[in-house]
Image (cartoon, rainbow, N blue to C red):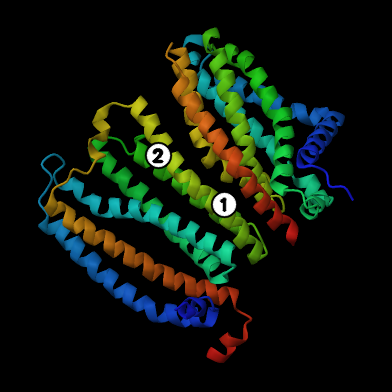
Amino acid sequence: MWTWFHKLASPPHAYRMLGKMAPWFGWTALAFILVAAWWGLVKAPPDYQQGDAFRILYVHAPSAWMSMFAYVAMAAAAAIGVVWRIKIAHAAAAAGAPIGASFTFLALATGSIWGKPMWGTWWVWDARLTSELLLLFLYLGYMALRSSFDDPQRADRASAVLAIVGVINVPIIHYSVKWWTTLHQAASVTKLDKPSIALPMLIPLFLMIIGFQLYYGWALCRRLRGEILRRERNAAWLKEAS
Amino acid sequence: MMRTPIVEAARLVFRRDLTLAWRRWDEVAQPLIFYVVVTTMFPLATTPDLTQLRVISGGVVWVAALLASLLALEALFRADVEDGTTEQWVLSGQPLGWLLLAKVAAHWVLTGLPLVIMSPIVGTALGLPYGAWGTLMLSLLLGTATLSVLGGIGAALTVGVRRGSVLLSLLVLPLAMPLLIFGARAVGMAMDGESPAGPLQLLAAIFFLALSLGPLAMSAAIRISVEN
């Protein structure tokens, strides 16, 4: 039963598997995102308060979701790498970090663009935006630590410790920031907070989240292949394959 | 050979670090001077008016204390890793996390505790009312201790790295944000005459979490740094 798992841990096999999986992820992601974009941007009714401006939600909310998903996935991969000493898992954590950081940045940028018509300024110290910003710092710290080692094995294991410490801290950071803003700010800001949103608006949002998730799968496959190539550049199987 | 009980081992590490620091006390004083210098910058940069400074005094004292104790953390494990002491600890059969925790505790006594003792003076200079002294010191006591453990993890990870100090701040400061939020909030509530028990209890909870899980992460990080 576990043979496929062991096979996946061997770089040549994983390299081939990822190459086969990538197009499936890629095309389904494209299909979901296109349908969700049409549904969300054209078909869904405008919001009675925010008009058409709310439609940026269809990029903002899935990116915010993916930013957290990618961090947890990265920490899980790092933990698997540490516990079972699987190199591919470390490579997956390394490949996933920039994707997660990009989603975090996208969530911040779209949140800020959304904030301009809603709050009148580009930036508000809102709980969700602030914890998203701190998440970006965590990603940047992780990538900075990884790049500061010359030896890839040490980089793998040191950054894995950081990812695991970080994932324990993410909920603490999230709730402390939330608590901080509820003490400081009026409730007017939080009207955007709880998505008590109507069903016709919700369906495209779910489709978009699935699409983003599939896109993440595609990007991870591609990046992980690149990471395997970089790490195994002197291996014999690569010479045979080429 | 008789094995040293772990408490004795930790005590020896603790005493050794204090003795070493005492021989070079000017290095111990540096973070404290940094602390005072940073807090002096805020009135110069904003306003000398005490009623306005009072609003930000708790936050300024907290930010300066975090930065000052981070500054001192960078070299925490460096000398020991370079001269092979840490390697001997790893091989000694004693629980590594326990020894590292003793080292961090010694470090905190040398840098965190002076900051806590100094904080009412610095706070008063910024217009902090006397009534908030106790809360300020208690919150900093918990906060700097937690930061020492968090920073210990960061220092253990970056011990063999070039430009370690900037990287250390980049790693540890985001993790320390909850401390800053709760600590500064507790001081703010005490200044407003409210009971600061809530944020102080949360600070204590984070402290115990760091105390229980931190040594595990520290010893894992030190093993990675020493092995190669």
From the image, tell me which residue sits under label 2: A130
How busy is the neighbourhood of tag 2: few (under 14 within 10 Å), some, or many (20 plus)? some
How busy is the neighbourhood of tag 1: few (under 14 within 10 Å), some, or many (20 plus)? many
**Rendered location of residue B71, percent (x, y):** 67, 36
Tell me the mark number nearer the camera, choosing from 2 and 1: 1
Between residue A207 and residue B17, name the one nearer to us. Answer: B17
Tell me where residue B226 sits by quadrant.
Answer: bottom right
| Residue type indicated by callout 2 | Thr
Instruction: Give the mark nearer the N terminus: 2 vs 1.
Output: 2
Q: On screen, A223 above or below A56?
A: below
Q: Chain of mark 2?
A: A
Q: On screen, B16 above or below A23?
A: above
Q: Which structural element holds mark 1?
A: helix
Q: On screen, A123 above or below B78?
A: above
Tell me where residue B172 sits by quadrant.
Answer: top right
Residue A119, visible in the rendered structure: yes
Work out whether disc 2 and disc 1 sit on a shared chain.
yes
Outermost residue to the top: B130
**Which residue: 63% across, 13% down?**
B121
Whether residues under marks 2 and 1 lie with C-beta atoms below 8 angstroms apart, the answer is no
Outermost residue to the right: B1
Outermost residue to the front: B2
The answer for how far apart the CA atoms under marks 2 and 1 are is 21 Å
Q: Is residue A97 left or right of residue B119?
A: left
**Rendered location of residue B19, percent (x, y):** 85, 31
| Residue type indicated by callout 1 | Leu
In the rendered image, the quadrant that contains the C terminus of chain B is bottom right
**Which residue: 58% across, 44% down?**
B213
From the image, tell me which residue sits under label 1: A162
Q: Which structural element holds mark 2?
A: helix
Q: Chain of mark 1?
A: A
Residue A103, visible in the rendered structure: no
